[in-house]
Amino acid sequence: MTTVRVPATTANLGAGFDTLGLALTRALILDLDAADADAVADSHPASRAFHTAGGEGRIAVHHDFPAGRGMGFSGAARVAGVVAAAVQRGDDWSARRAELLALAAAFEGHSDNAAASMYGGLTVTAGEHCVRVPSPLQPSVILWIPDRETSTKQSRTMLPDEVAFADAVFNIGRSALFVAAWATGDLDVLRAATEDRMHQDRRLAAVPDSAAALAAAVAAGAHGAWLSGSGPTIAALAADAPTRAAVVSALERLPSGRVDECAIDQEGTTVR
C-alpha cells in the first residue's frame, strides 16, 4: 500500500493574506491503492488533482480535520493528488516538490495553504517563489472550530478591490514583523504581528462567534491569534504551558465550538 500524508494548515496568520501558511499536525492521507468501495468520488478535490495530473485509477482519502473550516483541506487534497500522480508514474516526487506545488497552487487558486502542506513549518509565498522559515519556537497551536463551514469563494466576495494606503502599509509591516519574529523567536511582538486591516474584520463581521473566540484568545494571553484562512476557525499560538492552559480554558468557556490542540508539522508531505 502506498499512502501520501499531507498536513492541515492555517493560513494568512493575520496580515499575511495569501502569503503566509503554517502546517499543523493534523493530516489528510491519500491511499493510492484503494478498493473501489473505499474510493472517493471523482468530484473530490484530491481525485480531480490526481487525474488532472495524469493519475489513473481510484484513490481513497482519510483525514482527521474537517473540510470547509479554514484548515487548508482543499489545498492539502490537491497537494496529495498531484504528489500521488507523480508517485504512481515512478517519478522522484521529492525532487519535483517546487513543480508539484506550482501545479497544486494553480488548481487551488492561491499557494499559501498548499505551500505549507508541501514543505511543513512556516512558509512564505510570493508568485512562483516559496521560502520555508526556520524558527527556534515550538508553540502549541490552539484551534477553536465551530460546527459549520465557510465557503472560501464566497468569503472572498467580502473583500475590497482596493485598500487604503495606510492599511496596506500596516499589513506589509505586520506580515514582515511576523516572519522576523518567527525566525528570531521574538515572542514579544508576535501578537502585534498577527493584527490585520485587510480581511479579518470584514470576514469576522459575518461570524460573530468567531470574532468572540478571537477576542477571548487574545484576552487570555495568546502569543498571537487570527482567523484561520477564510474561517470560521480561529487559531492561537501558545509558547508555554501557562499560556496554553489559559487560552484553552477561555475558548472552552465559549458557548459554541470545540477546541483542538496541535503542534506545528515540520515534515510536510510524506510518502510511505
Image (tube, rainbow, N blue to C red):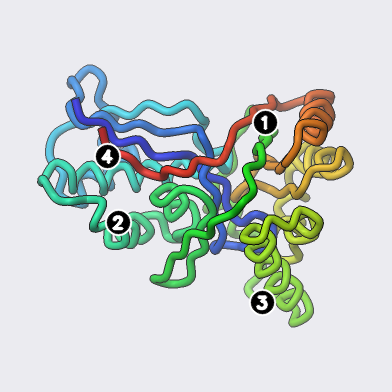
CA gap between label 4 and label 3 equals 36 Å
Question: Label 3 crowding class (10 Å Cα cut-off): few <14, some 14-19, many 20+?
Answer: few
Circle 4: element type: helix
Q: Is residue 109 left or right of residue 261?
A: left
Q: Which residue is disc 1 drawn over?
A: 146
Find disc 3 in the rendering and name its residue: 162
Label 4: few (<14), some or many (≥20) within 10 Å? many
Nearer-N-terminus badge (4/3): 4
Front position among marks 2 and 3: 2
Q: Position of residue 32 (x, y in %)?
A: 21, 32
What element does badge 3 sit on? loop
The C terminus, quarter of image: top left
**Amino acid at circle 3:** Glu
Of all residues, the one furthest to the right in this rendering is 219
Residue 199 placement (x, y as % from top left): 69, 60
Q: Which residue is tagged 4?
A: 47
